């Protein structure tokens, strides 16, 4: 990582050579760094290492525009690198034990994530709960969501500030479906999903959350946090 203001000061020969080498290093690395260069120029390129995005300064030198997601070495086909904004399937997790399942290490360039459920159930009746998190941890409050469930047992409608909620009326009810989360701007995410269960019943959830920081993880748990998963599996797909 290297950045420079591209101003060469009057100085002795050795210092001048070191300054030129610093300029060349900044050019070679696309001004890479976790924050933007302090001094900017029109059309300047910057590799934002925090979010994994190559950006370029606009013609009036007033804002950055995203050029492309950074290429990953493990995304290659016949030796040609491809962009990381393609669909990426994570590793499936069995929901046969425990009270939470976390997917961590989500890249900063991701703009949409879908969590998929196949036969997920618990030993209780507490609703399933989906929560987002940053490097500071999973966030358990500040959500603006609502959900509705129509089933053979009852009709339920509720709101939640703890996450996106999918209601269940009976223990061991197997849930299948998907919930998708998309970045609307900055660190604000919206989510919506439909999940069917074996009662039979269908649940819908929708809402939003301002994370206040970059999303890095996604969790599925239950509202009471103590019901234990006993069947099924979950996975995420992101882009």
Image (cartoon, rainbow, N blue to C red):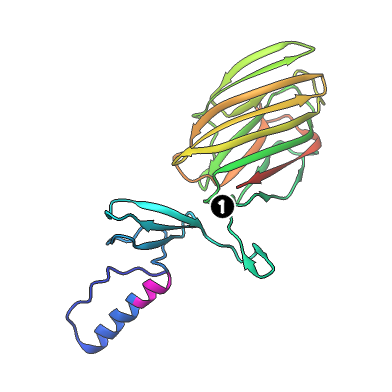
Q: Which residues are magenta?
A: 24-29
Pointer 1: what residue? Answer: 107
Q: How many marks?
A: 1
**Is 174 placed above or below 62 here?**
above
Q: Residues within 10 Å of mark 1 (few under 14, many from 20)?
A: some
Q: Quadrant of residue 29?
A: bottom left
Q: Please tell me which residue is depicted at 57% across the width and 19% down the height of the picture.
A: 159
Q: Please tell me which residue is depicted at 63% across the width and 67% down the height of the picture.
A: 80
Q: Is residue 140 left or right of residue 33?
A: right
* Residue 28 within the segment the image draws in magenta: yes
**Is 236 placed above or below 79 here?**
above
Q: Is residue 167 visible?
A: no
Q: Please tell me which residue is depicted at 73% across the width and 31% down the height of the picture.
A: 177
Q: Is residue 60 left or right of residue 160?
A: left
Q: Quadrant of the N terminus?
A: bottom left
**Is 194 placed above or below 106 here?**
above
* Residue 58 within the segment the image draws in magenta: no
Q: Nearer the viewer, residue 193 or 161?
A: 193
Q: Position of residue 172 (x, y in %)?
A: 82, 26
Q: Position of residue 147 (x, y in %)?
A: 62, 20
Q: Is residue 214 left or right of residue 166?
A: left
- Magenta segment, prevailing SS (helix, strand or loop): helix
Q: Position of residue 118 (x, y in %)?
A: 79, 35
């Amino acid at each position: 990582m290297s950045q420079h203001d591209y101003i060469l000061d009057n100085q002795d020969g050795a210092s001048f050579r070191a300054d030129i080498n610093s300029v060349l290093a900044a050019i070679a690395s696309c001004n890479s760094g976790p924050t933007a260069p302090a001094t900017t120029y029109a059309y300047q390129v910057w590799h934002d290492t925090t979010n994994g995005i190559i950006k370029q300064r606009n013609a009036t030198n007033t804002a950055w525009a995203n050029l492309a997601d950074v290429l990953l070495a493990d995304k290659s086909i016949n030796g040609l690198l491809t962009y990381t904004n393609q669909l990426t399937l994570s590793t499936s997790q069995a929901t046969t034990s425990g009270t939470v399942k976390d997917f961590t290490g989500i890249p900063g360039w991701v703009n949409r994530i879908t969590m998929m459920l196949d036969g997920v159930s618990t030993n209780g009746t507490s609703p399933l709960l989906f929560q987002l998190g940053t490097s500071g941890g999973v966030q358990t409050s500040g959500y603006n969501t609502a959900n509705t469930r129509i089933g053979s047992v009852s009709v339920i409608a509720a709101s939640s500030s703890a996450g996106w909620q999918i209601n269940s009326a009976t223990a061991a009810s197997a849930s299948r479906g998907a919930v998708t989360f998309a970045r609307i701007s900055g660190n604000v995410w919206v989510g919506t999903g439909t999940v069917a269960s074996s009662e039979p019943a269908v649940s819908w959830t929708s809402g939003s959350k301002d994370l206040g920081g970059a999303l890095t993880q996604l969790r599925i748990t239950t509202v009471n946090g103590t019901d234990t998963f006993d069947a099924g599996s979950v996975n995420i797909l992101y882009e």
